[in-house]
Amino acid sequence: MASPLKKDRCAPVTAKGEPPDVRPVGGVDADEELATLTKALGHPARVQIMRLLVRREACICGDIVDELPLAQSTVSQHLKVLKEAGLIRGDIDGPRVCYCVEPRALRRLKALVGSL
Amino acid sequence: MASPLKKDRCAPVTAKGEPPDVRPVGGVDADEELATLTKALGHPARVQIMRLLVRREACICGDIVDELPLAQSTVSQHLKVLKEAGLIRGDIDGPRVCYCVEPRALRRLKALVGSL
DNA sequence: CGGCTGTATCGTAGATGAACGATATATGCG
DNA sequence: CGCATATATCGTTCATCTACGATACAGCCG
């Protein structure tokens, strides 16, 4: 049903050709940033969403709702939290929205956590 | 003033001789664990506390209160959150309490974040 | 055009979080 | 013993989070 390609719309998760992140991993700003990112991730549903988006190497759309035991509006709220933290991106794809991981933010998160 | 050694009381932060963590980094349990750990870290004050405890390679005690612009009771609450998440430990050291990072939990957090 | 579908937003209710001051508890000291 | 110090806990207030249903909105399809 529907189009056979519901994924492979956003940028690839494994973006390798980008410049390295030169921002410091310490200091007050970095602390704030780490707190913001971890807070956004600090809910089981949002962890699940991130894993879904990472596992499928492309992004999926509202299929996320089907994977979680939550109402559509609730999932949309969680997606908004992740988006506002910069961890994911939502590209409008016709009537639906295609979410995908923002590789830079994910790498940044790993760097900040790794600096502890 | 007081005793010249207010630190160097808890276990070393760099515990190298421990067995590797064999728990899976995926699955529902891991998702819950990651959410719990990141939620605990998801506040600027708690990030600062973690950094304080990590930077001093040994643990410090109530000096944390002096470093943060928060009331003593508030700091104590944040320490409780971190402790309940397993990220730090508090060893009673006479009249004070000596907090230090729990290296296993920190490594676990890094592994879980790294698995994303 | 008009309806269908997918998504976001609104409004609301209950739960949790953050911060503080006040107070309790425990330990060492004189 | 009684006081001083260090930390935890209590009680409270205000803000934020979580979840839901209802509804609004936007694009496609017939």
Image (spheres, coloured by chain):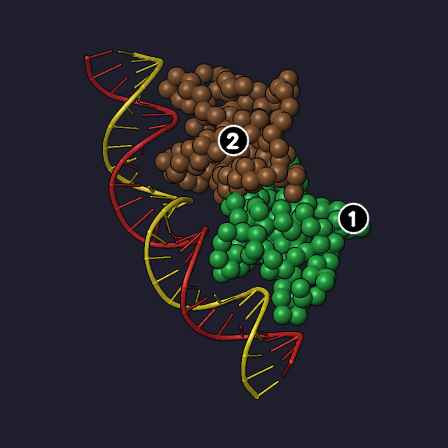
Chain colours: A brown, B green, C red, D yellow
* Disc 2: which residue: A87
Nearer to us in this view, B88 or D19: B88
Q: Measuring from the top left, give residue A88's x and y in whole percent.
A: 50, 29
Left or right side of C19 for C8: left
Q: 10 Å neighbourhood of mark 1: few (<14), some, or many (≥20)?
A: few
* Residue A101 seen from this side: yes
Nearer to us in this view, B103 or A35: A35
Q: Measuring from the top left, give residue A91's x and y in whole percent.
A: 45, 21
The quadrant in which residue C22 appears is bottom left
* Residue A79 seen from this side: no
The quadrant in which residue A102 appears is top right
Both labels 1 and 2 in a single chain: no
Nearer to us in this view, B60 or B110: B60
> Is the N terminus of chain B in the top left, top right, bottom left or bottom right quadrant?
bottom right
Q: Secondary structure at mark 2?
A: loop
Q: Secondary structure at mark 1?
A: loop
Q: Residue at x 62, y 35 (%)?
A: A25
Left or right side of A43 for B2: right
Q: Identify which amino acid the numbered label 2 is placed on.
A: Leu
* Disc 1: which residue: B16
Rendered position, B37 above or below A81: below
Q: Measuring from the top left, give residue B108's x and y in whole percent.
A: 66, 45
Q: Residue at x 74, y 54 (%)?
A: B12
